[in-house]
């Protein structure tokens, strides 16, 4: 699943019950001074699906994603949190990005043995993004996200995401 054409490991993701406090932990403990923070609410994605606050930072070439579920709309993300009011940050998934045209996404998904790697969740954002989460908890202890973004969207997201160490100009 990891060694497929046009793919690369691009992200490590954590779920939290307080994205602002989690960002502060990453700043003070892991030298990641800033994140691009947004919600998926009102983006044209399926509004009946999970509503999330998301923070992104690129560190050493790998994207760090922090996810805070909003309300009870996102059990796939919320269920790993222990409950209570104490800050929780829990590892959730790695992400495999599929590069190139949408046909590469279709080929990638077709190459997966979904009986062995069942889809736990899937979605799209119009014609510019596709994603699935395969449930690898039995063997790896976590999910694997597979994502494709149209090149223009990918440029937009990476342009907004703080990168560390900062590029030398």
Image (tube, rainbow, N blue to C red):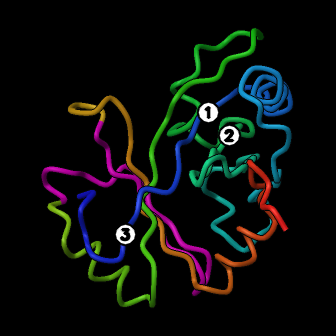
List x then y, in percent, for residue 62: 57, 51
Are the two marked residues, 3 and 1, in contact with CB atoms closer than 8 angstroms?
Answer: no
Q: Residue at x 56, y 41 (%)?
A: 13
> Is residue 28 part of the magenta span, yes or no?
no
Question: How far from the left and from the top, in percent, is residue 163?
Answer: 75, 55
Towards the viewer: 116 or 151: 151
Label 3 and label 2: CA atoms lie apart by 22 Å
What residue does disc 1 label? 15
Neighbor class of circle 2 (other Cα within 10 Å; few <14, some 14-19, many 20+) is: many
Q: Residues within 10 Å of mark 3 (few under 14, many from 20)?
A: many
Is residue 135 covered in magenta?
A: yes
- Name which of mark 3 and mark 1 comes first in the sequence: 3
Tell us which disc is closer to us: 3 or 1: 3
Magenta span of residues = 114-136
Determine the residue positioned at 61% across, 48% down. 60
* Residue located 64% across and 14% down the image: 83
| SS for dot 1 | strand
Residue 79 on image: x %, y %: 52, 27
Q: Kindly indicate whether the residue at mark 1 contacts the one at mark 2 (C-beta within 8 angstroms).
A: yes
Specify the quadrant of the image occupied by residue 126: bottom right
Q: Which residue is mark 2?
A: 66
């Amino acid at each position: 699943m990891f060694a497929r054409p046009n793919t690369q490991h691009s992200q490590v993701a954590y779920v939290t019950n307080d994205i602002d406090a989690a960002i502060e932990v990453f700043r003070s403990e892991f030298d990641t001074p800033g994140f691009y923070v947004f919600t998926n609410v009102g983006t044209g994605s399926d509004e009946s699906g999970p509503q999330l606050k998301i923070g992104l930072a690129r560190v050493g070439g790998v994207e760090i994603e922090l996810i805070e579920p909003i309300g009870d709309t996102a059990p796939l993300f919320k269920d790993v949190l222990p409950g209570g009011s104490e800050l929780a940050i829990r590892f959730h998934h790695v992400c495999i990005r599929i590069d190139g045209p949408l046909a590469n996404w279709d080929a990638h998904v077709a190459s997966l043995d979904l009986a062995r790697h069942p889809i736990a969740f899937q979605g799209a954002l119009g014609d510019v993004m596709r994603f699935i989460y395969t449930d690898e908890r039995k063997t790896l202890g976590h999910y694997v996200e597979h994502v494709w973004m149209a090149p223009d969207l990918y440029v937009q997201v990476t342009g907004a995401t703080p990168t560390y160490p900062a590029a030398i100009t």
